[in-house]
Amino acid sequence: MTDNDVTEKKNADTWEDVVRVVYPVKDAELTLPLYALDWTPPVLPETTLDSRIDMRTLDFGGMNQSSFEHLVKRGVAESGATGYAGKDTFIVHSRTALVVRKGSRTSLCTYFNAFPAGYWRRWTAVDTVRFAAEVRGTGTLYVYKSNGRGLSVPVGTIAVDVAGSETDRVVLDVPITGFMDGGYVWFDVEASPDAELQVSDASWQVPVSARTAQTCTTLSIAITTFNRAPYCIGQLTAISQAAELRKRLDTVYCTDQGSDLVCDQPGFDAVAQELGDQLTYIRQRNLGGSGGFSRGMYETVKAGKSEYTLLLDDDAISEPEAILRAVQFADYATKPVLVGGGMLHLDNRTILYTQGERIDPLHMWMHPSRGLGYNHDFAVEPLRDSPERHQRIDEDFNGWWMCLIPVKVLKEIGLSMPVFIKFDDIEFGLRAKNAGYPTVCLPGVAVWHQAWHGKDNARTWEEYFTNRNRWIAALTTQSDAVGKHVVRENIYSQISLGVRFIYSAMVLRNMALRDILRGPAYIADCLPTKLGEVRKVRSQFTDAQTKASFDEFPAPEREVVSPRYMPKSASQRHKLGIKMVLKGLLGRTNPDKMTRPDTAIDAQDTAWTWLAFAGIDSALVTAPDGDSVAWFKRDDKRFRKELFETIRLSRKLQKNWKKISAEYKAYNLPSIDNWAKIFEEESSAE
């Protein structure tokens, strides 16, 4: 589509596809509930009909047997995606075609195929959406809409009776009024008892006259990779095979910062040839995610061809249609917005980690928007049965597993903070929001990415960057009032680490505070070298010294029952916590004299609670990836030293917060000019 095409369409008030209905042709058995479902009669929870019910707490102690059984039966009856893999009612005929079997009914009220009308109502000038599709066979299409509470009503039916091999084009316009708080529009397909019904090339369209982009926009994609070459090849291949996406694509900037190079992988030459001049392969020293993504942003701005840059993780599996949806939404937004994508689990493909997050400025930590929680499984609770998922969600930022950013925003506020990894995406989202550019995490836009439950920052060198960068983000994006909480936050975090014997993390956190106090110039200058320094410091501690097998350590004296199976009341936990802290402050335990660990502790019990360490002085603890073991040893002297140093450094940061904040803001770490110097130094170093 050319710029003239855009003008002609706007003048003619024609319609444009913005959400094409698609189906999985690969890994369907893992992902199908995200695209299509067997139809079941809707059963509305009482809370959907009367939201006041949620204001009351359940009294389990006063519940009789009948009430309990009613509660359990209701929960069982309402959960689960039926017809997994479409074996009961429908067949995925192709990427854009679905065949519903005789006498069956299928619902498209799903994550990827329901139209997110609430978001279009809030962020664009679109007031009507059109459903359009090619049909063949006999049956009926039912179009529905919901509101932000999840209440749904029918808005139209389309009777289909098309015999033979021909197809018929059907359309239905739906005003998107009443969607300010959220809601979706979707369609169901019901085949007649004696004939199948095929629906193909279905789409949700909007009037081009509502388009705010005056030209045919294009995007560039920024991928950064570090020794994940096979994954990166997969990502490039998926893009190369997405014909519709490539019509809007200028360049893929693949920044390779590793030693296992993407260009040396089998298949690279083929995908490079397929993409042609739509691929720019860049090699540079490892500057972390912030350096890799900023290189892609920088090159996009410098090239001056694209309206958007899309940040995309190298190890994510993309739904290419989602990228197009992000671009189309941005084209219609009434103001420049960052369009974020959700993160679906790579190892449990129907689970959505999050659709949107907020930052708690007092703790400088993220939490799910509207309290919806993390890890929603659409195979267990499909969109049609999750009324709380129909509300529109506002966010502070989006993770850089996938995020579309207007080039206009980059030119105005700069690129990523030069902080290697961690909190660079959060800081950018907050900075953009402060400049008037919100983030919209659009449903139906997502990638599959490795989930966080197999990770624990406190057990890696990443703890340094997490703690340092979260406070830099607070200094540059939050009010000075946040500084009042820095002492309490750091003391609490250090105590939590100390009672779990993770002293390497305590040291790295103090190292982070000292570096913040050294000023923004140091943060920028140490970008290429800090990782090596952090790793060297961490390697000196026993909690960081792993071995491949339990057999390489003395056998533990006893087994300790996991705290997961021994829940304690809040008051019990509070008393136990105080006792553990006092032992660390007053104790004289010497780790050098330990000859045998007290027990062994699973990685998951190390990450989520300190209760597993109550009453012990050492333990064998497995790594979060389950591949190695470390011997954690109590060191009361180290605990006291690092805790007192935390108090000193935190007080100094708090006392000078306003001054330090002004220094970081004035230095403008993420400016394009600053990054240009960094990249020039990289080029000269080669």
Image (spheres, grey):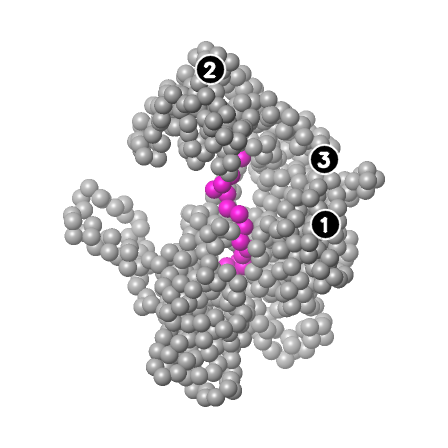
Q: Which mark is residue 264?
A: 1
Residue 528 locus on image (x, y percent): 72, 35
Q: Earlier in the sequence, mark 2 or mark 1?
A: 1
- Would you place residue 607 above or below residue 62 in this image? above
Identify the element where label 3 is drawn: loop
The C terminus - image quarter: top right
Q: Nearer the viewer, residue 52 or 197?
A: 197
Q: Is residue 603 left or right of residue 467?
A: left
Identify the element where label 2 is drawn: loop
Q: Residues within 10 Å of mark 2 (few under 14, many from 20)?
A: few
- Would you place residue 598 above or below residue 481 in this image? above
Q: Which residue is mark 2?
A: 594
Identify the element where label 1 is drawn: helix
Residue 208 locus on image (x, y percent): 61, 73
Mark 3 → mark 2, Cα distance in angstroms: 39 Å
Q: Which residue is mark 3?
A: 528
Specify the segment rendered in magenta: 441-457
Mark 3 → mark 1, Cα distance in angstroms: 24 Å
Q: Residues within 10 Å of mark 3 (few under 14, many from 20)?
A: some
Residue type (three-letter) at the residue carrying disc 2: Met
Residue type (three-letter) at the residue carrying disc 3: Pro
